[in-house]
Image: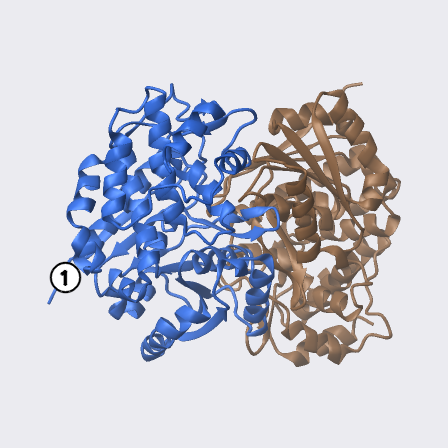
Chain colours: A brown, B blue
Amino acid sequence: VSRPLYRIPVPQSVSGTNGYEIVVGAGIWRSLPGLIERYCLAHRYAVVTDHQVAELYGSRLLRAMHGAGHRTDIYAFPAGEEQKTRATWGAITDAMLEAGLGRDTALVALGGGVAGDLGGFVAATYLRGIPVVQLPTTLLAMIDASVGGKTGVNTPAGKNLVGAFWPPRVVVVDPEVLTTLPAAQLRSGLAEAVKHGAIADAAYLDGLATRREELRAVDPEALCELVVRSVEIKVEFVTRDEREAGPRKALNFGHTIGHALEALSGYRMLHGEAVAIGMVAEARIGERCGITEPGVAEALRSVLGSLDLPTALPQDVSVERVIELTRTDKKGRKGRTEYVLLSRLGAVDPAGERWAHPIADEVVREALSATR
Amino acid sequence: VSRPLYRIPVPQSVSGTNGYEIVVGAGIWRSLPGLIERYCLAHRYAVVTDHQVAELYGSRLLRAMHGAGHRTDIYAFPAGEEQKTRATWGAITDAMLEAGLGRDTALVALGGGVAGDLGGFVAATYLRGIPVVQLPTTLLAMIDASVGGKTGVNTPAGKNLVGAFWPPRVVVVDPEVLTTLPAAQLRSGLAEAVKHGAIADAAYLDGLATRREELRAVDPEALCELVVRSVEIKVEFVTRDEREAGPRKALNFGHTIGHALEALSGYRMLHGEAVAIGMVAEARIGERCGITEPGVAEALRSVLGSLDLPTALPQDVSVERVIELTRTDKKGRKGRTEYVLLSRLGAVDPAGERWAHPIADEVVREALSATR
C-alpha cells in the first residue's frame, strides 16, 4: 500500500542558517536508513536519545542502520526534562570524543523535546558542528520543535537559556510512533495544534474538533494531516520573523500565562495543558480589552474540552502567583506584561506592528478569576 | 597626528556565517567606545577577559565605555589555557544570566586566544547567540584567531574539541597593546607571521627578517603592517576553503610536528616556538622527498633565528615520541601522517588538490634527527 508522503520545506533563514525539509508520512520510519542516507550521508552515526525511547525504538533503529551498512552507536541519557543540562551535554560529547567520532559523523536526535534540544546542541558544538537528523517521537516535538532549528539546555536561571540555532538536515516524522505515546502527552501536543488554528486558520481549528475521535484513536492519516498543517503554519510565522521581534510573537499566544502555570506546577503540569488554560484566559483578556471578538474564549474552551484538554485554572493555583510569574517570563518587558491577543479565531491582532499588548494586572486578574 | 587605519574585510563564509571587518591601527584603542558602538551597538556590554588582562586594560576600557554612556560590566576568569573549559564557560554564562543580561547585550572578548575562544563561545551560546566584538591582546590572536570565527573550549580529550563558528561583528587590533606583551609571546606570534610568508609570500618573509629590529622594539607601524599582511593571507586561504578540506590545509604548515612538540612539552613550549621548529623540520621533510626546493629549510632557519625563535629540536625531546604524537594529531589520517609541504618559499605544493602528502615515518625520523 502506497501512502502519502509530505515534504514541507523550511526555508533558509535570515540569520544564514540553512534550509531543510520536514518529511511526514505514516510508516516512513520503516525506511529510515534510506531517508537518513539520502538527506545526511555520513561515515558514522551517533544516535542521541533517552533510555525510555532507546528501549522503544533504539534497537530497531540500530538494527536497521547496521543492516544498511552504517556504523551507528547509541548515546543514551536518563529520561526527563531535568536531564536537559550542560552536564548531560558534556557527558554525551565526552563519550562521543572517547569513541573517536570525527567530523564525518552525523548525529541522530531521537525522542521528544529533550532529546531534540540536547542532541541538537551536541551536534551544534561537537568539533564546532556536525550535521543532525531529527526524529521526533512526541506530537509536540513534531509540530513545534521541528521548525526553527532551536537547540539548547536549561540552566539554574531558567529553561533554554544556553544553546544555538542549528537546523537539522532533515526532520523525519512518522505519526505511527505516536501510538506508543502516553495519551496525556498526545493531548499536550494537540494544544499546540489548537494554538496554530487559533492564530492562523479557523477552518483548521474546526477540523481538529470535527476529527477528535480519529485523533484520540491515534489515526495515522489524521495525524499526518495535522502535523503537516501545523508545521506549515509555524514555518510561515518563523520565516517572516526569525528573531522573534515581530509577527513570530503570535506563536506565544497562550504562552505568557501558560509558562507561568507550568513553572508554578514545578513543571508537573504538561506544557500543552498549561497552554490550553493559558489560551482560554488570554482570549478572555482580549475580549475584556475589546480586541478579541466576543465568543472566542468560549469557542476555544469548547474545542480544547472536546480534545480532553483542561481549560480552567486549577482550584489550588493562586491568581496572584500566576500574575507575579508572568512578569519574569522571558517575553515580558519591564512594567506591564505583554500579551499576544487574537482579533478573532484564526487571526492575531497586529497591535500596530508590535504584535503584543501591554496589559494591566487588573485585567489579567479578572480574566484569570473568570477561568476558574 | 593622524595615523593610518587599515580595514580588512573577512567575507561571508560558505557555511552562511556573516562577514565582518578587522580594523587595525596603532593607538585606535583610544577610540574604542566609538568603534564598538559603530560596529556593534547594544543596550549593555559584557567584557569577558582574564584577571591579568583585566588589570592591564579592563578598568581603562570600563571607564571609557561608561564615559560614552554604555552600561558595561567585566566578567573575568583566572588567566591560563587550563581555564579554557566548559566549567569556565558555564560560570561566565551563569554570572551573565544572574545579572539579567538579555538578548540586547553584546559581548566584548578582551585578551589572547583563551579569552577570544572562550568569550566567543559564550557569545555563540548565550540565549542562543549574542553579538561579539573581539579585542585581541596577543600577536597570535591578532593574526590567527582573528580570522575564521572559530570559538570553543578544551575537553579532557583534547584542545578545541567543543565550540562553534561564531564570527565577531568586528575585530579591533591596536598593536600598541603589544608593548605590554611578554617578549616570548611576541616571538610566538612572529612564528605564525613567518608561516604566512612561507606558504604565500616570499617578499613578506624577507621583510620580516629585514625589519627584525623594529619588530623586536615593538614598533607599532611595523607591527600594523605585519598584522595587515598576515591577516590578508589568512583571509585568502580561509575564504577559499572554510571547512579545511582543501587549500586551507596550507595553514597547517609546521603544525603537524608543532602540535606534537607542544603536547609533548605539556604545553609549556609556546605555540609559536613549537611551530618554528616544526616548520624547519617539515621543510627538511619536503626537501628529502624532492618536493621542496633545496635550501628552503636553511632559509627558514635563518629568518626564524633572526627573530630569536628556536629552530632545533630540544635535546631532551625523543624523536620517536614526536612521531608517535603526530599520528594522534587532529589532521592525521589513518596510516601515514599527512604533511603540508612547501614547493618553494612562498608556495605550498598542491599535492594534486589534496594539499598534503602522506609521509613514511622513516623520512620524518631522518628530518627530525637533522633538526637537532
Looking at this view, is B49 or B203 the one in front? B203
* Residue A311 seen by the camera: yes
Judging from the image, mark 1 belongs to the subunit labelled B
Residue A57 lies, with reference to residue A35, above or below; the image says below
What percent of the width, then of the height, locates residue A120? 64, 45
Q: Amino acid at mark 1?
A: Arg
Residue furthest out toward the left: B1
In the rendered image, the quadrant that contains the C terminus of chain B is top left
Front residue of A252/B62: it is B62
Secondary structure found at label 1: loop
Q: From the viewer's perspective, tell me whether residue B150 is left or right of residue A49.
A: left
Hey, which residue is sitting farthest front in the picture?
B315
Residue at image point 35% right, 22% down: B288
Locate residue A106: give its quadrant.
Answer: top right
The answer to whether any part of residue A218 appears in the image is: no
Q: Could you tell me residue A123's position as x and y percent?
A: 61, 43
Q: Residue at position x 12%, y 64% from top? A: B2
- Which residue is identified by label 1? B3
Residue at 15% over, 57% down: B4
Q: Nearer the viewer, residue B306 or A363?
A: B306
